[in-house]
Amino acid sequence: MFHVKQSEKTSANESFGMDTPLAREIADLSARRRALEAASVEFGGETRVLTVSNQKGGVGKTTTAVNIASALAGLGAKVLVIDLDPQGNASTALGVPHSADIPSVYDVLIDESPLADIVQPSPEDPNLFCAPSTIHLAGAEIELVAQVAREHRLRRALVDYLADNPMDFVIIDCPPSLGLLTINAFTAASEVFIPIQCEYYALEGLSQLLGSIQMIQKHLNPELHLSTILLTMFDGRTRLAQQVAEEVRTHFPDQVLETVIPRSVRVSEAPSFGQTVIAYDGQSAGAIAYREAAVEIASRTATQSKEK
């Protein structure tokens, strides 16, 4: 997270002629916006492939995937989002058509269509692309069982795609379950990115997910590692949220980002307009937090992430 000098906050408060919680919040947001405008991140190294996963539903997994992708694209990175969730919410948020007759990830996994045949540009940013999901993906779990090399289909398709279409980041949005779709994502990725909500049972199921990562490391993809944890739905007014944040940071000191994502009406509203919060209201507190998180992620090289 960007740290703002107290003197900057004070001068901003004085300009409002008061020192109230609202004035302090406005001053803090203004200072963070200025810090983001001054932020500079370079791209051009090897492609980082992150799978966004959490077997616990309702933690902001898809919201985090699309907003981090949009924020990274806004920083100048070329980003591909692979929507591996049959619900297709990531495709919706990125403004990409994903009706039943649209070529999708299903065709890549089941019919071995080239990934390039299904990737669509997102209207949000010329640097942002999406491989959409359709309703057909709901049956892919069963169909994959009988397929040859069923765990490696996405990985092979992605390697072929990146050979001709270099990207800085590939972000894979997984379904909230450990099936063959998620295993394909883990096999294709090198980094696991876990959003954790600052609520009761935040760490519920996390040990199972970490066990799954170790299993994939051992049998399918030794490069896979947990690189990033992002705290979401944070309400700084509650003691519970602060306790959860402290607990997660204690367990995963190197993986947890400094930035936390606050509870935000704008973040919740954006998907209903077929947009990320970055496009819907880029100056809101939620959008600023996701942009700060994206700068943190981009500032960590793939090598640094692996060391962590």
Image (spheres, rainbow, N blue to C red):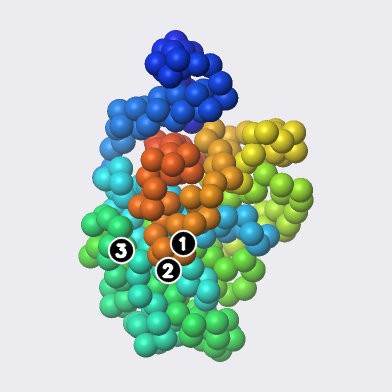
Left or right: 281, with 22 as reference point: left
Q: Are marks 3 and 2 in contact (CB under 8 Å)?
A: no
Residue 271 disc label: 1
Q: Nearer the viewer, mark 2 or mark 1?
A: 1
Question: Separation of disc 3 and disc 2 at Cα?
Answer: 10 Å
> Height in image: 121 above or below 107?
above
Closer-to-camera residue (234/62): 234
Left or right: 8, with 216 as reference point: left
Farthest residue, direction front: 17
Mark 3: amino acid: Ser
Farthest residue, direction top: 7
Among the two numbered marks 3 and 1 on one chain, the one whose residue lies closer to the N terminus: 3
**Local crowd size for mark 3, using a 10 Å CA cut-off: few (<14), some (14–19), many (≥20):** many
- Circle 2 residue: 92
Question: Separation of disc 3 and disc 1 at Cα?
Answer: 14 Å
**Local crowd size for mark 1, using a 10 Å CA cut-off: few (<14), some (14–19), many (≥20):** many
- Circle 3 residue: 122
Q: Residue at x 47, y 39 (%)?
A: 285
Mark 2: amino acid: Thr
* Residue 200 coordinates in the image, percent (x, y): 76, 48
Among the two numbered marks 2 and 1 on one chain, the one whose residue lies closer to the N terminus: 2
Q: Are marks 2 and 1 in contact (CB under 8 Å)?
A: yes
Residue 140 disc label: none
Question: Separation of disc 2 and disc 1 at Cα?
Answer: 7 Å
Q: Quadrant of the C terminus?
A: top right
